[in-house]
Amino acid sequence: MKNVMILTGHGEYAKGIRSNLTFIAGENEDLYAVDFLIDDTEETLKAKFKQILDETVGANYVFICDLLGGTPFRCAAGLSQQQPGIEVVCGITTGSLMEALFLKDTMSIEELAQSLVNKSHESCVRFEMINKVKTASDNLESEQDGI
C-alpha cells in the first residue's frame, strides 16, 4: 500500500517545507503541501485534506504538522480518529523528512511516523566547539606564564 505524506501548517509553512525538500531531494508525487492561510477556517482546511484523501484513495497517510495543538494538527488528528491508516506527527526536521521520503514505501505507516519522530530527535542538536586548536603562540604564552 502506498504511503502519502501531507505537510501542513500555518501560513505558507507547508509550501516552504515542500520547496525545501524538492530542492534537496527532487520532486515526489506522494508529498503534498496544505497551507492553513489567514482566510481559511477549520472547514476549508478539512476540505483541502479531504481532496487529497479522495485523490489518493487506498493509501495510508502521515500528516506532518508545524505545531502541536494548532488548527492543522487538530484537523489532522480528527481525521485520524475517523479513518484507519492515518498518522499525525509534528515538530519534524528536514533531515527526517528527507529520509522518510526515500524510505516511505518500505515501512508501515506506523513505522514511518515513528521514524520521523526518532530521526528528528536524533538530528536536533546544539553545536558546541569541543576542542580548540592550539597554535604555536598559545604554547609560547603558557610556557612564559611559568617563568
Image: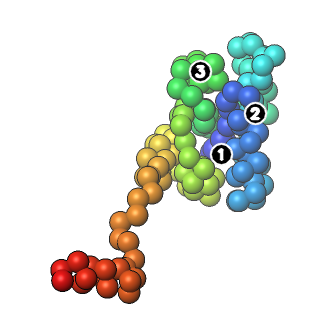
The front one of 32 and 146 is 146
Observer-nearest of 13 and 81: 13
Q: Any mark on residue 2, and which?
A: 1
The C terminus sits in image quarter: bottom left
Other residues around mark 2 within 10 Å, as few (<14) / some (14–19) / many (≥20): some
x and y percent of residue 2 in the render?
65, 45
Q: Residue at x 76, y 39 (%)?
A: 15
Relative to 37, residue 97 above or below: below
Q: Alpha-carbon distance for marks 2 and 3?
A: 14 Å
Q: Residues within 10 Å of mark 1 (few under 14, many from 20)?
A: some
Q: Residue 12: x and y, percent? A: 76, 33
| Residue 14 visible in the current orientation | yes
User: What is the image's colouring?
Assistant: rainbow
Determine the image quadrant of residue 9: top right
**The disc label shown at residue 12, or none:** 2
| Nearest to viewer (mark 1 / mark 3) | 3
Q: Between 24 and 1, which is closer to the camera in this rendering? A: 24
Q: Residue at x 60, y 32 (%)?
A: 65
Q: Quadrant of residue 99?
A: bottom right
* Number of other residues with Cα within 10 Å of mark 3, as a class: few under 14, some 14 to 19, many 20 or more: few
Give the residue at mark 3: 70
In the rendered image, which quarter is residue 58 located in?
top right
Q: What type is the residue that disc 2 sits on?
A: Glu
